[in-house]
Amino acid sequence: MTTYDRLIKALGAQGKIVRDSGTEARTSCPSCDSRNPTSLAIYRKNGKAKIVCYVSCEDTDVLDVLDLDWRDLYDERSASEPLDRPVKKHSPPKSPVERALARLLAMPDLGERLCRCIAARGGDHD
């Protein structure tokens, strides 16, 4: 089974209706629960798959919901990689605001960015 087929099968198991053209598949994103039936695209090229959410999700967010990891984006596995993976426990899907806040808090220079924003706005306004 190719990586592209594996992703389409996992989306079908989530109850998603997938429109597949052979090299591109479209469906609604299972991570952000978008109602747009084309918000998530999966592209196939040279034994690789690329996941793109046109709403707000990262590819890792989608993979987490599908119980897959980054290695599942490639057709070939090296002999040193184990075939069985531990079962992941999932938290409920995060809202776009929660995901944006998590990305912001993961930035190492958050304090400096905040100080620059305050300085750019003219400091204190009483």
Image (tube, grey):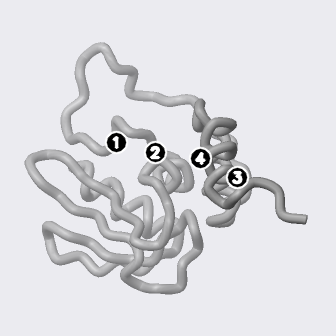
Horizontal placement of 103 versus 43: left or right? right
Separation of marks 4 and 3 at Cα, in angstroms:
20 Å
Horizontal placement of 76 versus 86: left or right? left
- Mark 4 is on which residue type? Arg
Say which element carries label 3.
helix
> Which of the pair 7/125 is nearer the observer?
125
- Mark 2 is on which residue type? Leu
Image coordinates for residue 6, horizontal then vertical, percent: 32, 54
Quarter of the image where one finds residue 70: top left
Q: Which residue is mark 2?
A: 68
Horizontal placement of 107 versus 43: left or right? right
Separation of marks 2 and 4 at Cα, in angstroms:
21 Å
Mark carried by residue 103: 4
Q: Residue furthest left?
A: 46
Q: Nearer the viewer, mark 4 or mark 3?
A: 3
At 82% from the left and 56% from the top, the residue drawn is 124
Q: Few, some or many C-alpha atoms within 10 Å of disc 1 (few <14, some 14-19, many ≥20)?
A: some
Q: Which residue is mark 1?
A: 72
Q: Which residue is mark 3?
A: 118
Separation of marks 1 and 3 at Cα, in angstroms:
43 Å
Which of disc 4 and disc 2 is earlier in sequence? 2
Q: Few, some or many C-alpha atoms within 10 Å of disc 2 (few <14, some 14-19, many ≥20)?
A: some
At 44% from the left and 40% from the top, the residue drawn is 69
Separation of marks 4 and 1 at Cα, in angstroms:
23 Å
